Image: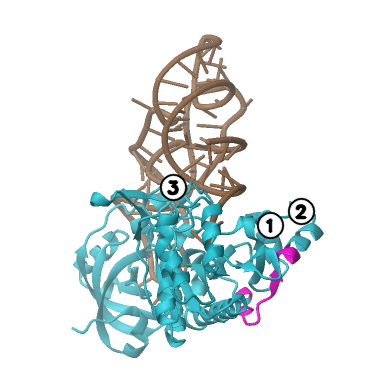
Amino acid sequence: MKKIYISELSKYVGQEISIPGWVYHKRSSGKIHFVILRDGTGLLQCVYFKGNVTPEVFELTDKLGQESSVIVTGLVKQEPRAPGGYELDAKDITLLGNSEDYPITPKDHGIEFLMDKRHLWLRSAKQVAILRIRHRIVKAIRDFFDNKGFTLADSPILTPAACEGTSTLFETDYFDLGKAYLTQSGQLYAEASALALGKVYTFGPTFRAEKSKTRRHLTEFWMVEPEVAFADLNDNMDLAEEFLEYVVQTVLAERAEELKVLERDVTKLQNVKRPLPRISYDEAVEILKKNGVEFEYGNDLGGGDETIISNQFDRPVMVHRYPAEVKAFYMKRDPENEKFALAVDVLAPEGYGEIIGGSQREDNYDLLLGRIHEHNLPQEAFEWYLDLRRYGTVPHAGFGLGLERTVGWICGLDHVRETIPFARMIYRNTP
RNA sequence: UCCGCGAUAGCUCAAUGGUGGAGCAUUCGGCUGUUAACCGAAGGGUUGUAGGUUCGAGUCCUACUCGCGGAGCCA
């Protein structure tokens, strides 16, 4: 028999069909049993009347444990009383794999328990919706860059040294070559690729061994990093806002059902259209002072500061030209004021914080070499990077977008751990 | 690393220093349209670990373990 998914049931009204799936839930009322079937594409209520099926089938539908795998057979009917609008006037059922005492019941559970059972928690409606949205975001990201002539040029995950020299890295032995480190950013390699291909992006996992314990941090997370040759900070901001608009509007258009499952207030996402507001670090500091924040000028913005700033706007806000001291060594200084780096962070609304960090890169060999020394970085490890300035250097810029933070923001979640199938955090690497 | 909060049934939680309970889940019974169905009944506990105070500790004290949230750092 042809395999049918619940999502395409509307095409089979009046026909007898079989669908494989899992028992999501069941209710009974004496001579009638309701089995709610889940197949990964939707939910289907299957109705078993005592008079319509064999005693063996009726008995089985009473005993089925939550998440038992079954094949149901019956007649597809339109039924306003059923969730989804269709139901199965069921005739038969075949048990594939029994499930007893399924731990995740349709009641409240604590986060520790759910994370311990993450491999099963993924089957829940909200988690399915989140992962579908995550997938659509990934596809939108790829579509956006592919359609604009970018080439995917992935950066290595095992690297010989710190990209930025600041974060704590995961370390591993690498044969006779000493230590290797899991990458914390593909950017430096993306710069090399951009000078080969013009417009590139790298999209892969990145790793931070920092002991961050907040709703915005994972030790392993995905980042997309476009890099463009012959681009300055303004080009970079133009690209970032067009990119964000495309991703958000695509998800709104194509994952409306999933956003509904998550009860996301989409009016906050509908505003994500160009132009996004652009303010300088100085203007951001003014906003903080107006809101009574004691902020020491020259510091980086903290999580609370970002929330106050983003609350002034109805869409993501770009904050540019940060004090160079708080930013990475490779960022180009503002020619109009050497104290500032040509950096830009995009702060998501509703307290979701920094989802994009980017900059125009330092393209002058002597200045870059000086920065490497100022930051006490080993010049030898960066010789290849310096080569990019020795041989045909050009102005170039790029940014990195954190996938999980973006998924969390678009889905309206309060923690990034639900945005990836199996989150890796400081105190959790299982399941 | 620092600060705060927490750990009681499979799960979510309650219990004035004085006989550890409820809802859900499970099992049994009832119900021909349920929507986290409902009604009745039953089983289910070394209260995170180790000490201490007390006639008596789930409750008070100390240490430890684990978890959650935040800071720093960052996407």
Q: Is residue A122 left or right of residue B5?
A: left
Which colour denotes chain A?
A: cyan
Tell me where the magenta segment starts and ends, as one range: A268-284
Give me the disc on residue A426.
3
Which colour denotes chain B?
A: brown
Q: Amino acid at mark 2?
A: Val
Of label 3 and label 2, which has the lower sequence position?
2
User: Which residue matches tag 1?
Assistant: A305
Q: Which of the two residues, A3 or A237, is positioned nearer the viewer here? A: A237
Position of residue A70 measured from the top left corner of the image (x, y, whole percent): 24, 68
| Image position of A301 with respect to A71: above or below | above
Give me the disc on residue A293.
2
> Label 1 vs label 3: CA separation?
25 Å
Position of residue A161 measured from the top left corner of the image (x, y, whole percent): 40, 54
Chain letter for the residue marked with disc 2 in the picture: A
Q: Amino acid at mark 3?
A: Ile
Give me the disc on residue A269.
none
Q: Is residue A126 visible?
A: no
Chain letter for the residue marked with disc 3 in the picture: A
Q: Mark 3 packing: few (<14 Cα in 10 Å), some, or many (20+)?
A: some
Q: Amino acid at mark 1?
A: Asp
